[in-house]
Image: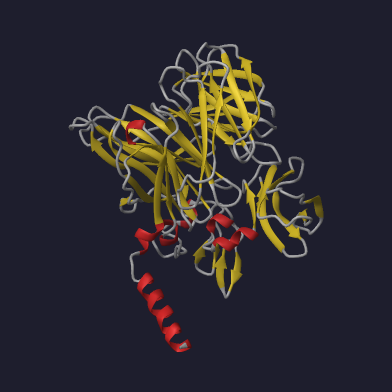
């Protein structure tokens, strides 16, 4: 009887494993927020295994509501959904939300108010419940596109003023506007990220600028792209997103480009000094065809090897949406791999990609703006997870600060691998291929960091979190209280270099490395 049961189990396992992995690892779903059009362009990973998406009612009347929803690793909206109401109508909410600075976790969002010269800010906890919201007066009207944590505390958001010039507002830790500046650069600021060496880079409508911490303009550049199939130039771009690379590798810029008759997704690489190293069009469509198909960018994420980026976008008619697409692009020289379909069955209108918990995750709006959309692909990153051999034609010297170990390229994001059974094992949780039980490990982000470091995951109550420098000296120590899933360490005044954080308790003794730069 025992042998029969064993054989039956083996048969079931063999039958299950014979099905294509792709079909079993692609998940998607939608959720209704409101009876009218939805707009959701940004997602953020949760501490453990889930993701948060935020948006609003788009260009509809009485646009004073912000929606938040959480979905899990299988792209299912089965956890929580929140609705927050501003004191008056908002201008359309774009991508301007990020993780908050609170040690309890949570999110910060900013949106312009329709009455002009005012801004609405809100902070929630990790499950979307409101901590506070407030209204601040600005010296002029600003529409906001992107936001990130400020290097000197609080937040910094970008957008444009009434003259269509790029603008920035700095907020303190409780969402009060501290200063607002605009720049004589035409374009809407879709994205802002911390720059290596201090300050920030902004991108929008073919313009890329860098500003200092106090908002002083450092430099401005204009994106150049290959010509479109009809020979005309791409004269307009939008939805720009910035992917910072580690050290002095610069950053990746992605967006949508439009010419007289075509649109396409683009990927470009810049140095932190503003030099454009390369630019590529990923795919083009003829916008004069029936239904006005377009190729709209999501953004780019690092591949598991760390030597390539995965650029994602969607194609199809403007409102109806269409298929999700992706392409691997070499960071060093911009060489492109084959365009791949991501297998979605629900048409996607606008979306944003991220990578966390060993998955490619996309969140946004389904076609016709009718519902919020979630997509999860557990196989795509694994398929691109094998280390890149040095003899694959990639010029390693074109990517500064990327060491090689035993014939492998280490991750651009985390250049300090460890070893297991003689093979490279990445310490960064997003680069591992672990099972769900890996959440007992620590997650340290951002990594690299400019000073404020968050440690999250499945915490052991009563355990000690200890931060050590490279010499082994303990810098800081905190106890894990009950119910806490994320703890922050302010290491702003510590020297640059590699550090470790260790959780020591009765059940776990786990160490993770991170870099201050």
Look at the image and tell me in which quarter the N terminus lies.
bottom left
Look at the image and tell me in which quarter the C terminus lies.
top right
Q: Where is residue 396 shown, x and y percent of the image?
A: 47, 57
Question: Is 260 on the left or on the right of 123, as rendered?
Answer: left
Question: Is 364 on the left or on the right of 139, as rendered?
Answer: left
Q: Where is residue 121 shown, x and y percent of the image?
A: 60, 24
185 to 470, vertically: above or below: above
Of the pair 108 and 165, the residue shown nearer to us: 108
Of the pair 395 and 371, the residue shown nearer to us: 371
Identify the residue at horizontal 54%, vertical 26% (top origin): 158
Of the pair 231 and 472, the residue shown nearer to us: 472
Confirm whether residue 215 shows in the render: no
Q: Where is residue 298 shown, x and y percent of the image?
A: 40, 39
Identify the residue at horizontal 74%, vertical 57% (top origin): 470
17 to 234, vertically: above or below: below
Of the pair 147 and 10, the residue shown nearer to us: 10
Confirm whether residue 262 shows in the render: yes
């Amino acid at each position: 009887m025992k042998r029969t049961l064993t054989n039956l189990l083996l048969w079931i396992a063999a039958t299950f494993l014979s099905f294509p992995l792709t079909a079993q690892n692609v998940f998607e779903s939608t959720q209704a927020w409101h009876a009218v059009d939805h707009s959701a362009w940004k997602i953020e990973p949760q501490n453990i295994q889930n993701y948060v998406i935020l948006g609003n009612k788009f260009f509809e009347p009485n646009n004073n509501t912000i929606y938040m929803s959480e979905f899990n690793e299988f792209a299912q909206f089965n956890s929580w959904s929140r609705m927050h109401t501003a004191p008056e109508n908002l201008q359309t909410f774009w991508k301007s939300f990020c993780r908050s600075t609170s040690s309890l976790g949570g999110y910060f969002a900013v949106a312009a108010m329709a009455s002009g010269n005012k801004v609405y800010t809100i902070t929630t906890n990790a499950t979307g419940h409101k901590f506070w919201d407030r209204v601040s007066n600005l010296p002029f009207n600003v529409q906001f596109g992107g936001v990130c944590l400020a290097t000197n505390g609080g937040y910094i958001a970008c957008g444009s003023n009434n003259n269509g010039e790029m603008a920035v507002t700095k907020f303190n830790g409780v969402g009060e506007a501290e200063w607002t500046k605009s720049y004589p650069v035409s374009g809407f600021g879709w994205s802002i990220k911390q720059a290596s060496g201090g300050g920030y880079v902004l991108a929008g409508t073919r313009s890329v600028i860098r500003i200092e911490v106090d908002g002083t303009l450092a430099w401005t550049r204009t994106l150049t792209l290959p010509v479109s199939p009809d020979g005309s130039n791409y004269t307009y771009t939008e939805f720009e997103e910035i992917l910072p690379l580690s050290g002095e590798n610069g950053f990746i810029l992605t967006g949508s480009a439009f010419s007289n008759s075509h649109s396409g997704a683009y990927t470009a690489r810049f140095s932190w000094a503003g030099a454009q190293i390369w630019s590529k069009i990923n795919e083009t469509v003829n916008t004069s065809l029936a239904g006005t198909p377009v190729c709209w960018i999501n953004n780019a994420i690092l591949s598991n090897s760390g030597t390539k980026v995965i650029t994602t976008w969607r194609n199809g008619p403007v409102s109806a949406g269409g298929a999700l697409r992706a392409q691997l692009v070499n960071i060093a020289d911009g060489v492109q791999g084959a365009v791949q379909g991501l297998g979605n069955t629900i048409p996607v209108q606008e979306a944003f990609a991220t990578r966390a918990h060993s998955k490619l995750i996309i969140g946004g709006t389904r076609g016709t703006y009718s519902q919020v959309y979630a997509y999860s692909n557990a196989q795509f990153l694994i398929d691109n997870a094998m280390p890149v051999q040095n003899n694959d034609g990639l010029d390693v010297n074109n990517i500064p600060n990327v060491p090689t170990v035993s014939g492998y390229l280490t991750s651009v994001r985390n250049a300090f691998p460890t070893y297991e059974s003689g093979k490279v094992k990445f310490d960064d949780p997003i680069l591992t291929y672990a099972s769900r039980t890996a959440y007992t490990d620590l997650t340290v982000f951002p990594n690299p960091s400019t000073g404020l470091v968050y440690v999250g995951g499945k915490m052991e109550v009563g355990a000690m979190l200890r931060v050590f420098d490279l010499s082994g000296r303990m810098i800081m120590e905190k106890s894990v209280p009950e119910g806490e899933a994320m703890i922050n360490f302010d290491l702003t005044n510590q020297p640059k270099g590699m550090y470790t954080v260790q959780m020591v308790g009765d059940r776990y003794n786990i160490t993770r490395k991170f870099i201050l730069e």
